[in-house]
Image (cartoon, rainbow, N blue to C red):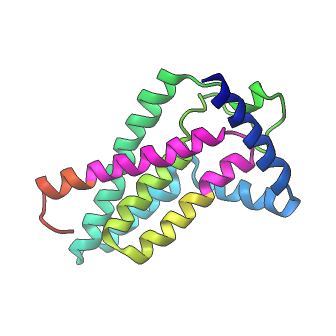
Amino acid sequence: MEWILEKDGQLLRWLMERFSHPVLDEMMRFVSSLGNKGMIWIAIGILLLLFGVKNKKRRNGGLLVLLSLAVNFLACNVILKPLVDRTRPYYVLDYTPLIPPVGDPSFPSGHTSASFAAATAIYAINKKWGIAAYIFAAVMGFSRLYLGVHFPTDVVCGAILGTVMAKIVIKVYLTKSVKEI
C-alpha cells in the first residue's frame, strides 16, 4: 500500500510539473468550478426534464441523470469519503494548490465521480451526447489533478465509482419503471 501511495504522489507531481501553464491554470479552474456541488450536471438533468415534457426519452434521461447523481453522492460523499478519510495531496506533499484548499477528504474525487455518473446516464439516452459528456468528465478529472487537489487514484476511483453507480441506477430504473429509455 505504501508503494501505491508513493507512486500516486510522484505521478501527481509529474503531471503538475509537465502541464503547468498560465492559460491552462485559468481553463482548469473554470472547468473545475463547473463541477462544484455537481451543479453543471444537476442543471443538465433539470434541463432534460424540462425539455422532456413532450419527449419521454429526454424526460427519462433527466431522471436518470438526477438519480445517478443522487446515488453517487451517497456512495461517494456520504459513505466513502468519511470512511477512507484520505488527506488531500497538498497537505501530504506540502505545496499550495491552484484553488483554495477544501476541507473534505480526498478519496474519491467527488467532481470526477459526479461527472462520470452523469456522463454514463447521458450516454444511456444518447450516444453522441454521452461521448461529449464522457470527454468533459475526463477533462473534469484531469482538472482536479492539474489544480493539485486530488491524487491520481482519487480521480481514477471516482471515475469508476460514478460509472458503476450510474449503471446500477440505469439497470434498476429500466427493470422497475420502463422497458426502454
Q: Is residue 143 magenta?
A: yes
Q: Residue at x 56, y 64 (%)?
A: 136
Q: Position of residue 149 (x, y in %)?
A: 70, 39
> Picture quarter containing residue 71?
top left
The magenta stretch is 140-169
Q: Position of residue 48 (x, y in %)?
A: 35, 68
Q: Is residue 65 left or right of residue 181?
A: right
Q: Is residue 170 left or right of residue 131?
A: left
Q: Nearer the viewer, residue 46 or 168?
A: 168
Q: Residue at x 70, y 35 (%)?
A: 7
Q: Position of residue 33 (x, y in %)?
A: 65, 52
Q: Residue furthest front?
A: 3
Q: Residue at x 16, y 68 (%)?
A: 180
Name the chief secondary structure element in magenta.
helix
Q: Judge whether 33 appears above or below 152 on screen.
A: below
Q: Is residue 134 magenta?
A: no
Q: Nearer the viewer, residue 36 or 147?
A: 147
Q: Judge whether 135 appears above or below 71 on screen.
A: below
Residue 144 shows up from this direction: yes
Q: Residue at x 47, y 57 (%)?
A: 41
